[in-house]
Amino acid sequence: MAEETEKELRARLARLTGAARTRPLIELFQILADRYWRAGPGRPAALPALDGAIDCLTEAYGYLRPGDPMRAQVASQLGWFIGTRQMAHGGPESDRQRAAGLLEEALAATNLPPMFTCIARMTLGQLHLTSVVRGLQSLDMPTLLAGGGHRPARTEAERAIDCFQRVLADDLLGAEVAEGVRAMLTCAETAGDLFAGLNAGTSIGTSIDFGPMMQAMAALQEMQRRLADGAEAGTMPRLPNLLAETVDPLDFPVTVLHGPEPVPGDGNRVRRSAAPVDLAALRRALRERVAGDGDPYATLAALLRPDTPPPPVGLVDDLVGLATSVTHAAGAAATAADRVVLAVALYLRGRDDADDGWGDADDDVRAAAVALSAATDDLPADPSGAVPLAVDLAGLLDGRDPEGRIGDALHDRFVPVAQALRGVRVQALAWSRPDGPRLLLHTDDGRFRDGRPDGALPPRVVVVGAEPLPDDDAVISHVASARQAGELAGRVPLRVTEAPVLVVDPRGGHDEAGLVRLCRRLYPRAVVLGRADGGSDGPGTPEEVRRRLDASMLHLTCGVSAAGALELAGPADLDPAAITGRTTRAATEGGLVVLPPSGDGSGMLAEAFLAAGFTGVVGWTRPVPRPVATLMLAVLHTGLVRGGLRPAAAVRAVRRWLASPDRTTPAGLAPAPMDVTGPALADPAYRSAMVYHGI
């Protein structure tokens, strides 16, 4: 009977396209799923039925839009079966991540029937427990007992504990399956105790009783054997029917399952607090599904282009599911980038779907517009590079519905930034695109436009992000976000010679005597800290440097640790987090910082000094040999003082000096640290090494 029904369904599917395939796909899934359970979970012969069931439900899930009554139920079953493939058949890690995202989406819904909820929680708990057990198996026992080596995340065990406790409290499963859940709960609790001991530095060999875990594992293995032998006898949890007889007026199936009311536990077990959803793991899974190890924004931007080939089957549906999981798990903390990625995924699905009578084909497109609109307020503060993607999507959405005016709403959010930058004579704010022209926000009218195909920039431009742009014809500076650009534009830069501070080699090993002598002549009023010829005003401790955060120019010649901390006298480090507060300056006034040419930690230090009230920071994208850095810094300070240049223009002067075949040693720098006439200084890597953070 099932074989005949399967033939009829496959014949129907061959004649259907688009969303009209949803119901027969779900019916075919039910047949293949039943075949899988009867063949025996985990057995190789059962795998083709499992793969076929997953393929059917994956396609059906892709046709169900947010808000569809069936969506959460299909997500729960699809997550269950993908998770089963990963756990019972050694599926890839991507199966575990994809299944967890679908199950989280299903459990977040308000209309998921009790049995679906129970199975989704049980499967999610198994996925977390599997990750925990594999992490433990990767460790050798002596290392584990010593408390060393890699320690799997304790939150995985805590999340598994919470899932299994809720499943047992609901009491919807048969006694056989409930026995297995209790065994898994014991395993998870023992692992949680183990991780708690590891985190606390406890001697694990004496503090953890592995007896309960061993007994639970034995009981679990015996239960699994009995289930595999008796799958046809009804010991497996009953497969919920996705297609009940009762359907809604739009012919969407709605399953109503009734079970006993949840009963309270025995009260003897102390319920552990539920671990939060691992948002970082969800975002990582989404990123990997989009682009693997590549740039997700580049991949999404390419998918939006009309000349791009259709994406692989299932990709867009996976993106919608994972992006929905991310935004739901983040809640109010969802970033603009989270919402933009969801909007793109929804738009792609709506663009590629046809209206086959199962609803409005523009539902996803409208949902994309809502998601993008929700992101607009936070986009000026976005540091991730999502702004070009949002602008491109807004143009596509307005092309389909000009009355929506998503693009206008997006532009309005950036008008204050454009006005602030126009007030300090910046022509454009720029974002890089992975492939294609840069996106420019023109400050004269506050509108977004693509940059020139040849990459040429306006004479004065601020770039969002850290990408070095060795363009000798433009004065370039960098900011972390558009909002930061607007804030920095409102600060008043101090004259660098007003109250300069030189921090010179406080620990030794970074002596730049020639550069220091030049700086003393350029900044005769400078306070000198550290080990300098001619004496100093202090040894250069972290506290002394913190007291000088109101300097008009703070030049730092010291080491930078791998963590981004300044290595000062003591010896002691000044962490970026400790660079806060000023003593005498007005809130709108700020000085300039010149960082050591290490390249390591430059970005963190730059952000810390800007947050402390400085108007700009000269940093480095990569380490530069000391002789080359000495020459570059000499040109920089000469341009700032003798040339009267603003910092961004002084950095451009350094680039021009390096590129010039007629370069000469900066006046006052003696002896020259290296021959300046040779070709070595023309290396393009040096020209793009020094960058200016600020306006």
Image: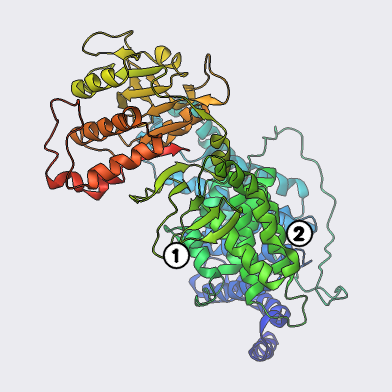
Q: Which disc is residue 436 wearing?
A: 1
Q: Is there any visible trace of residue 620 in the rendered image?
A: no
Q: Secondary structure at mark 1?
A: loop
Rendered residue at 57%/58% (across/down): 448
The kind of residue on which mark 1 rests is: Gly
**The N terminus - image quarter:** bottom right
Q: Residue furthest front?
A: 643
**Quarter of the rendering containing residue 237:** bottom right
Q: Secondary structure at mark 2?
A: helix
The kind of residue on which mark 2 rests is: Met
Residue 251 percent across, percent down from the top left: 83, 77
**Quarter of the rendering containing residue 532:** top left
Alpha carbons under labels 1 and 2: distance apart: 50 Å
Few, some or many C-alpha atoms within 10 Å of disc 2 (few <14, some 14-19, many ≥20)? many
Give the side of residue 387 with respect to residue 598, left or right.
right
Along the line of sight, the residue nearer the viewer: 136 or 500: 500
Residue 373 percent across, percent down from the top left: 70, 56
Along the line of sight, the residue nearer the viewer: 42 or 94: 94
Q: Is there any visible trace of residue 382 in the rendered image?
A: yes
Along the line of sight, the residue nearer the viewer: 457 or 222: 457
Rendered residue at 64%/88% (across/down): 10
Q: Earlier in the sequence, mark 1 or mark 2?
A: 2
Rendered residue at 77%/63% (across/down): 67
Disc 2: which residue? 115
Q: Is residue 449 above or below residue 330?
A: below
Residue 23 percent across, percent down from the top left: 73, 79
